[in-house]
Amino acid sequence: MIPRYARPEMTAIWEPATRFRIWFEIEAHACDAQAALGVIPKESAEAVWRAKDVEFDVARIDEIEAVTKHDVIAFLTHLAEHIGSEEARFVHQGMTSSDVLDTTLNVQLTRAADILIADVDRLLAALKARAYEHKDTVRIGRSHGIHAEPTTMGLTFARFYAEMDRNRNRLEKARWEVATGAISGAVGTFANIDPAVESHVCKQMGLRPEPISTQVIPRDRHAMFFATLGVVASSIENIATEIRHMQRTEVLEAEEFFSPGQKGSSAMPHKRNPVLTENLTGLARLVRSAVTPALENVALWHERDISHSSVERGIGPDATIHLDFALNRLAGVIEKLVVYPEAMMRNMEKFRGLVMSQRVLLALTQKGVSREDAYSLVQRNAMKVWENGADFREELLADPDVTRALSPAEIEEKFDLGYHTKHVDTIFARVFEKQPDREI
């Protein structure tokens, strides 16, 4: 993982030193449980814990692995160098490598999920604050990129808040899904280790025992976890794309904060580009790239193979580190986003009332005009606006077929912006007040 898109707290979870520390804790807790069962001497379990303050030498473990071609054996050999071979002979009793590797991976993923949930909380706070700030800031809504009907900037922020709130719920479920451990021995039958050992280790490591694990924890759990990260990444891109659109010169309803001394282009000094949200779009692609390999990891040969191992060594750190960085970058973008209400109104008025066409259509039908005829009447006046820059209201007032059904006052009333914002408070209540179906 390159430092450019990494934050220290998340990166630390995936450092070799952290991984070896978790390995040690799993082995030490297992020894405690074995000693309680009388399988190994209590003194041997205590001897293992005497290494708890040791900083395991990553280079030394790598040196041993170069010979053994086995990472867990290399670690156990290095541990024996600290506690002595006599006591070390009781370490890893009845366990298999996957007991350590899979349980460790799930500890790392749950810790990563905790950070990601906190990241989403920061983003939610920013979106909520901006939503209320611009609750009544009217802007044009667009469908297919074309002017549609009025909405508000607050509703835009609220929509993204609701989406990210769902993502928080999904992350909590994904964390729960992957928070299992397995200390069940070769092929998962507990033949050489008591299930009580697994229960003890999982409790100490903050996990639940996996109900049935063969020799590995089932990878459908991990597939769900990484799929959730992919959904969150897509939501990040959704928000980033809207900001990129708003920052286009022809739109310019909002833009990323441009700090003093910042440069937008090496060639064109006038440029202020949406570089952060473009970066977020790219990071979202990287996070989603982990989803398909995670899904393909579900199918393993018999009790296990290790085709999933190399995949997870890559996607575990990469997806969580990228997503952590992206969530924090997006929160910063939202917190500092510069919004231009005047530009929003100018864009609204660019087509001189055209966006009120549906209100006129519905009013005509209420007066007894067939929907087909009403549509034709409204559309023929609307096309004059598109093609000739006419004023929509004036064209309607000058059309005798329209005025036969609607009085001038009734036509004027159809151009009231407040009509389109009358239910904003209702929508905000739905989004920001806790709803039962939003609980995990």
Image: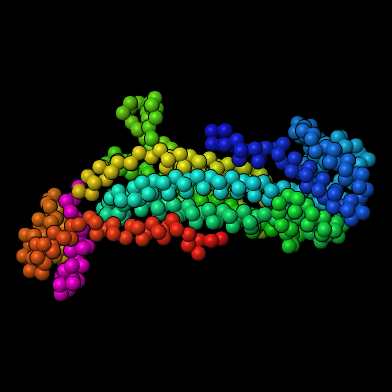
Residues 362 and 73: in front is 362
In the picture, the quarter occupied by the N terminus is top right
Residue 306 visible in rendering: no
Taking the image as shown, residue 239 lies to the left or right of residue 6, namely left
In the picture, the quarter occupied by the C terminus is bottom right
Asked if residue 354 lies in the magenta stretch, the reply is yes
Residue under the image location 88 percent in, 45 percent down? 45
Where is residue 323? Give x, y as percent.
54, 44
Please determine whether, in this image, residue 335 is positioned above or below residue 419.
above
Please determine whether, in this image, residue 334 is positioned above or below residue 93.
above
Q: Which colour scheme is used?
A: rainbow
Taking the image as shown, residue 397 lies to the left or right of residue 312, namely left
Asked if residue 439 lies in the magenta stretch, the reply is no
Residue under the image location 13 percent in, 59 percent down? 412
Residue under the image location 63 percent in, 56 percent down? 176
Residue 41 visible in rendering: yes
Where is residue 116? Give x, y as percent.
56, 46
Specify the segment rendered in magenta.
Answer: 350-373
Where is residue 55? Give x, y as percent.
77, 33
Q: Determine the image quadrant of residue 70.
A: top right
Residue under the image location 44 percent in, 52 percent down? 161
Where is residue 316? Give x, y as percent.
63, 46
Taking the image as shown, residue 329 lies to the left or right of residue 223, namely left
Taking the image as shown, residue 322 lies to the left or right of residue 147, namely right
Q: Main secondary structure of the magenta part?
A: helix
Q: How many marks?
A: 0
Please determine whether, in this image, residue 55 is positioned above or below residue 210.
above
